[in-house]
Amino acid sequence: MSQKLNKSTEARVGRDNQRYNEENSARIVCGCICLNESKDKVIMISSSKHKDRWILPKGGNELDETMEETAIRETWEEAGIEGRILKILPIVQDSRGSKAPVIKGEFHPDVATPKTEFHFFEMKVDELSKSWPEMKKRQRRWCTYSEAKHELIKSKRLELVSALDSSSLKKDDIDNY
Ligand code: 5FA
């Protein structure tokens, strides 16, 4: 795998170059499950739209990028992480079901966010930068499996729980939560 990272100081914005699934018009979103060396911790970030909700670094796949490039770029922009992609994880579908709008053609973020298809990669974290493009917008923290799952359920992001479950993150004692 190529593993290219352009450590930009600003995040890409806008949806003009967003890639959609040609069959069902789902928005393609890519991200990383960022693990420590011993694979018992994962990095979570706060959502920019809901500051009290914790999610995983991810964002829209753009037309000039491979899915892996998007995952690496978003992980840098949103979480300031550099690392090595170890594997591709199974695709997970939007957990909003029929409530998620299907939009054909041009996308208008102010009107609705279309249904999403998530492509996650497992990454081993090499370095956490002290500064990164979205550091003023987001918090970042290491979590155990049970902490991460607890936060994702609280954030109503069951598709992100599926992505986490498909990774090599070691499961600790979930009964504590
Ligand atoms: N959204 C909310 N719940 C969703 C679900 N279960 N499945 C799919 N999408 C869901 O919010 C990003 C968008 O995802 C929102 O428009 C929301 O309606 C929709 P977020 O996941 O909380 O992430 P964020 O607040 O950090 O938002 P951004 O990083 O700006 O958005 P993206 O992750 O879409 O990526 P971008 O970097 O390409 O903009």
Image (cartoon, rainbow, N blue to C red):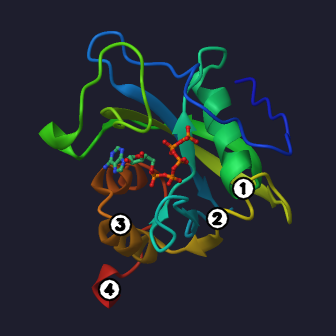
Q: The disc labelled 3 sits on which kind of residue?
A: Ser
Towards the viewer: 111 or 38: 111
Image location of residue 74, percent across then percent down: 65, 42
Picture residue at 37% right of the left edge, 17% below the top: 21
> Residue 127's image quarter?
bottom right
Query: Mark 2 — residue?
Result: 138
Query: Mark 3 — residue?
Result: 155
Q: Is mark 3 within 8 Å of ligand 1?
A: yes
Image location of residue 135, percent across then percent down: 74, 62
Q: Label 3, label 4: how many angstroms apart (C-alpha)?
A: 15 Å
Q: Is residue 91 visible?
A: no
Picture residue at 63% right of the left edge, 31% below the top: 70
Circles 1 and 2, Cβ within 8 Å, touching? The answer is yes
Q: Is mark 1 within 8 Å of ligand 1?
A: no
Query: Mark 4 — residue?
Result: 177
Q: Is mark 2 within 8 Å of ligand 1?
A: yes
Image location of residue 176, percent across then percent down: 34, 89
Q: The disc labelled 2 sits on which kind of residue?
A: Arg
Q: Is residue 96 above or below residue 25?
A: below
Q: Is residue 21 visible?
A: yes
Q: Which circle marks residue 134 in the picture?
A: 1
Q: Label 4, label 2: how many angstroms apart (C-alpha)?
A: 24 Å
